[in-house]
């Protein structure tokens, strides 16, 4: 695993995008907020080393890590991919995973 951040991206472009979105946010309020957050996340993603990403996910975003482990244990992604990735209801997924429908419903809502 590399200890260096990605070198493929264009840091200058990402910083310019943050400046642009930040100006829009300052002038227009909350309408540009989500775009500014997205631009900031893109910069962090570009600067962060793979090791830092794993550490952030495991220790800084414990809900995300726990959810990923639950999804893995339930083989949720494999079940979602069945039948060519066709849409599935929570009831269908509950039967496929042997999970409680109410708990699975709350779990799935996290990812929407």
Image (cartoon, rainbow, N blue to C red):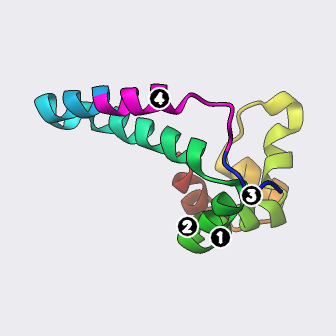
Marks 2,3: beta carbons within 8 A:
no
Q: Is residue 9 in view?
A: yes
Q: Which residue is mark 1?
A: 58
Residue at figure coordinates x 12%, y 29% from the top left: 27
Whichever of callouts 4 and 3 sits on the residue coming sooner in the sequence is 3
Q: Quadrant of residue 36?
A: top left
Quadrant in the picture for the N terminus: bottom right
Q: Percent from the top left, x then y, of residue 34?
A: 34, 37
Q: CA distance from mark 4 to mark 2?
A: 28 Å
Residue at figure coordinates x 80%, y 56% from the top left: 95
Q: Percent from the top left, x then y, of residue 67?
A: 65, 64
Q: Which residue is mark 3?
A: 3
Overall secondary structure of the magenta section: helix
Between label 4 and label 1, give the one nearer the viewer.
4
Q: Nearer the viewer, residue 21 or 97?
A: 21
Whichever of callouts 4 and 2 sits on the residue coming sooner in the sequence is 4
Q: Which residue is mark 2?
A: 61
Between label 2 and label 3, give the one nearer the viewer.
3
Q: CA distance from mark 2 to mark 3?
A: 20 Å
Q: Which residue is mark 4?
A: 12
Q: CA distance from mark 1 to mark 2?
A: 6 Å
Q: Percent from the top left, x then y, of residue 84?
A: 85, 28
């Amino acid at each position: 695993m590399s200890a260096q951040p990605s070198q493929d991206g264009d840091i200058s472009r990402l910083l310019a995008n943050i400046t642009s979105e930040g100006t829009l946010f300052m002038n227009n309020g909350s309408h540009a907020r989500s775009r500014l957050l997205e631009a900031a996340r893109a910069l962090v993603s570009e600067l962060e080393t793979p090791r830092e990403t794993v550490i952030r996910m495991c220790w800084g975003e414990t809900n995300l890590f726990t959810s990923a482990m639950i999804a893995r244990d339930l083989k949720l992604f494999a079940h979602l991919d069945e039948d060519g990735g066709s849409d599935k209801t929570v009831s269908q997924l509950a039967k496929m995973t042997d999970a409680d429908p109410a708990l699975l419903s709350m779990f799935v809502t996290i990812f929407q």
